[in-house]
Image (cartoon, grey):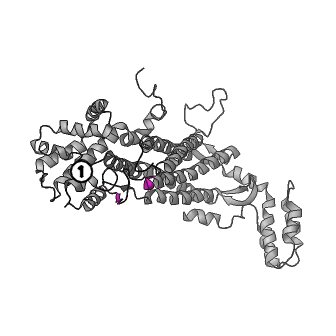
């Protein structure tokens, strides 16, 4: 059976193939090999630029151009050649070294220093930088822009629905009114903060040999300031240099990044579930797509499938992200290989993240608020005005206000405007102006600063 989107084992490469092209170019096996090649070539050029390594003189401009072009234009055919070598070596990073020797065999300048390809490196010197570059690119070019679209849409809904009053529900029961715009503003604010947390993580990198001590480096060139060279090399990739490692870069910063994604996802899952609920209440209708079917047997159905898809994918993503963030910083002694196989799935986790973002945005774009339905629910919930009445009673020193309103409203069906107004009119200790203000209050107008807050997001 040929491997196609129809026959793929993973839904990321099957059903959702077309929605993940941006991440496939970053986290595929080909992309990982490409990044390794880039790191290896950059290290060779760094050695050539180091005055203390006389055996590797500075490269000529044509050679520099050839090395840069090989890194920039690394092709799928090149990747296939690396994998063919790996089939013999059974070692993925060593295969990259041998590939470079073959690919650059026609360059005499490079061949004179061919032994300095992968010089003093352990595989993890290459891998940690390759993965850090991949994660940085995915964050900056794909995932943060996708998250920004959701935040922008939420802010737009907050402004649009700033004065769309609705009955709030705490514990699933009627509570003080709010506006739909304010509820979207809440999520937009939370998500923006979570987004900043993702962006703020500074990924680390190392280039210090088999156990982090520059053992081989110093053995070959004791006079070179290897820590200075390694720091400049790592920082040249836009990463923060980690001076203390075992064989692997310990993945603490990577765990921070994965946790940051998981926290943002938790906010979005909260949004997905609330939106699903508001659709169920009729507060939103969903814009219908021509030709789309909601049920195989019930023609009338317009299901909230985008929010359901988002919630499901973000749940899968968080299961993977949280496992990775707990596992990756843990390595037996100076290293074991368990991190390697886990790291290969980071693209899978972020693939589910991107699907969750994409589906959530689609769901938000389909929402059509039913303001009349929201107002209708409020009109049936006059009991929510018990809160402001008892609060004003407290202001004017009336004792037992809370208890009196509890007797009047708690657990009672059909609390009416007339019943509340009769109670207000009987409050002799409250000034007439305050009574008038309370009598003018309705569930629709009892929204505090909700509308103002929504407009400020």
Using residue 29 as the reference point, say whether residue 418 is left or right of it.
right
Residue drawn at the location 46% of the way across and 25% of the way down: 7
Image coords of residue 233 (percent x, y): 27, 56
Using residue 332 as the reference point, say whether residue 301 is left or right of it.
right
Disc 1 on helix, strand or loop? helix
Q: Quadrant of residue 70?
A: top left
Q: Which residue is more in the foreground, 271 or 197?
A: 197
Q: In which quarter of the image is the C terminus?
A: bottom right
Q: Quadrant of residue 88?
A: top left
Q: Which residue is more in the foreground, 324 or 329?
A: 329
- Tell whether position 253 is magenta: yes
Image coords of residue 28 (percent x, y): 38, 38
Image coords of residue 266 (percent x, y): 57, 51
Residue underneath mark 1? 43
Tell me which segment is drawn in magenta: 236-254
- Tell whether position 245 is magenta: yes
Is residue 148 visible in the rendered image? The answer is no
Residue drawn at the location 15% of the way across and 49% of the way down: 64
Residue drawn at the location 11% of the way across and 41% of the way down: 107
Q: Quadrant of the N terminus?
A: top left
Q: Which residue is more in the foreground, 362 or 197?
A: 197
Chief secondary structure of the magenta portion: loop
Using residue 447 as the reference point, say whether residue 130 is left or right of it.
left
Image coords of residue 344 (percent x, y): 42, 41
Looking at the rendered structure, the number of numbered marks drawn on it comes to 1
Is residue 93 visible in the rendered image? The answer is yes
Q: In this view, does 264 lie above or below 100?
A: below
Q: Which residue is more in the foreground, 433 or 155?
A: 155
């Amino acid at each position: 059976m040929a491997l196609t989107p129809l026959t793929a084992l993973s839904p990321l490469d099957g059903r959702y193939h077309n929605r993940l092209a941006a991440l496939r170019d970053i986290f595929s096996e080909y992309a990982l090999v490409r990044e390794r090649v880039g790191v290896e070539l950059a290290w060779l050029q760094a050695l050539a630029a180091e005055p203390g390594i006389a055996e590797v003189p500075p490269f000529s401009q044509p050679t520099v151009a050839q090395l840069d072009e090989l890194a920039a234009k690394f092709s799928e055919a090149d990747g296939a050649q690396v994998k063919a070598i790996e089939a013999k070596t059974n070692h993925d990073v060593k295969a990259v070294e041998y590939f470079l020797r073959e690919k650059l065999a026609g360059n005499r300048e490079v061949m004179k220093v061919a032994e300095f390809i992968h010089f003093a490196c352990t595989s993890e010197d290459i891998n940690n930088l390759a993965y850090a570059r991949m994660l940085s690119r995915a964050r900056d070019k794909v995932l943060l822009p996708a998250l920004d679209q959701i935040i922008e849409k939420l802010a737009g809904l907050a402004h649009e629905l700033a004065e769309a009053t609705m009955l709030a529900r705490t514990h699933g029961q009627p509570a003080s009114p709010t506006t739909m715009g304010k509820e979207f503003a809440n999520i937009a604010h939370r998500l923006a903060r979570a987004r900043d947390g993702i962006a703020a993580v500074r990924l680390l990198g190392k280039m210090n040999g088999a156990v982090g001590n520059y053992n081989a480096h110093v053995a070959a060139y004791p006079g070179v300031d290897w820590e200075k060279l390694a720091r400049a090399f790592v920082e040249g990739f836009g990463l923060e240099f980690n001076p203390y490692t075992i064989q692997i870069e310990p993945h603490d910063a990577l765990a921070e990044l994965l946790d940051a994604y998981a926290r943002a996802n938790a906010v979005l899952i909260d949004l997905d579930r609330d939106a699903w609920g508001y659709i169920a209440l009729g507060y939103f209708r969903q814009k219908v797509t021509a030709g789309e079917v909601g049920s195989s047997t019930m023609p009338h159905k317009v299901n909230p499938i985008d929010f359901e898809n988002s919630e499901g994918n973000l749940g899968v993503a968080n299961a993977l992200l949280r496992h990775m963030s707990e596992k990756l910083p843990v390595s037996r002694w100076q290293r074991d290989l368990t991190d390697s196989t886990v790291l290969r799935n980071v693209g899978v986790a972020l693939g589910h993240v991107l699907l969750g973002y994409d589906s959530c945005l689609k769901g938000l774009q389909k929402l059509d608020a039913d303001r009349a339905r929201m107002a209708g629910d409020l009109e049936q919930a006059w009991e929510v005005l018990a809160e402001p009445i008892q609060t004003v009673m407290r202001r004017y020193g009336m004792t037992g206000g809370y208890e009196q309103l509890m007797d009047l409203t708690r657990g009672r069906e059909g609390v009416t405007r007339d019943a509340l107004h009769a109670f207000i009119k009987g409050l002799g200790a409250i000034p007439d102006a305050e009574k008038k203000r309370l009598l003018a209050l309705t569930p629709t107008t009892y929204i505090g600063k909700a509308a103002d807050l929504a407009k400020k997001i």
